[in-house]
Image (cartoon, rainbow, N blue to C red):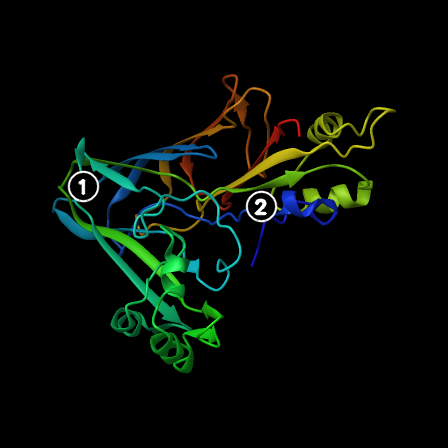
Amino acid sequence: MRIAQWVLAVAMMTAAHADDSSAMLKAGSIVFTRNTPVRMAAEDLYVSPTAVRIRFEFDNPTSRDVETLVAFPLPDISTWDFAETPIGTITDDARNFIGFKAVVDGKAVAVTVEQRAFIKNKDVTAQLVAAGAVINPVADGGYDKLAKLPKEKKKALIAAGLAEGDGVDEFYPKWTVQTKFYWTQKFPAKKKVVIEHAYQPVTGQSFFTTAEHKRAEKNMFGDLDYCIDERTWATLAARTGANTASSDGTRLMTTYETSYILSTAGNWQGPIGKFHLTLDKLKPDNVLSLCWDGELKKTGATTFEFSKENFAPKRDIVMVVFENAAPQ
């Protein structure tokens, strides 16, 4: 499991600090389930560690109405990975664990929710339902509910390859949960349709310090997803105390890792007509870093923005926000 690769100092932390780490999951946007002549005229995207908001304008330039399924796939959940490892920010709703909401032309959308479980691309949902097992155990105490299954049902799931353990003291699920929302959307001929949606990203949290890291290690850090430049690295070094005679740089910073899948095509025609991005680090003293193809302009105490016409994204948004940790 990929747990916060950017936490370079995790091996030096105390067990109490390590227990506070949680994993990020990648999510993206809506997709069409088939190719259509519909064009994305505009996209306005806001991303922060606590919220993702998107406003689309879709244009149907043809002389006929187009109707298609619009889907929003939630991040996959590996029940094996999270059996003993904290996940990032989620809600208590096992089916809508990122609080997804959608609006079309100003009216809330009634969406259908589909949640299924898979083992190596084999659908095992029916077996889990028959056993009374929780499909998505990461929310609302689901792992405790699995642990309370009758012994014979747990052993049956183990025998079927859906879990590991002895069925008494140990029971570790192995399936992957796939959840998607979808609805049927009509795009009238020669008209625009505005689709807005919002959700809470599964932001991972851990700790960072520059202590005992050489320049080569810094370069390795920068070569991940965050492209930390010299100025940003100097700021982080100062915040962790690496630049002072009385400190060895071991002061911790809290780090928040958030991702948005931007590069995947949505089955609409051509590039995005007008694209606008806002990134928000939430607090003025926080430090934001990510790799980005283009100029991000600082537009407020916490915000950075980017705009481009006929935009064809080739890179996902994977950003890290550093925050001064509270005094211990």
- Image position, residue 218 (x, y; %): 75, 41
Q: Nearer the viewer, residue 108 or 306?
A: 108
Q: In this view of the protein, which residue sits in the foreground, 192 or 326?
A: 326
> What residue do we see at 42% from left, 48% from top?
27
Which disc is residue 21 wearing? 2
Residue 189 visible in the current orientation = yes
Residue 6 shows in the view:
no
Determine the residue positioned at 37% across, 61% down: 177
Looking at the picture, how far across and down is residue 158, in whole percent?
42, 78
Among the two numbered marks 2 and 1 on one chain, the one whose residue lies closer to the N terminus? 2
Q: Residues within 10 Å of mark 2 (few under 14, many from 20)?
A: many
Q: Quadrant of residue 33?
A: bottom left
Q: Is residue 197 left or right of residue 66?
A: right
What is the secondary structure assignment of the residue under circle 1? loop
What residue is pinned by disc 1?
109
Q: Position of residue 309 (x, y in %)?
A: 41, 32
What is the quadrant of residue 41 in the picture? Answer: top left
Depth check, mark 2 against mark 1: the one in front is: 2
Q: Is residue 274 left or right of residue 250?
A: left
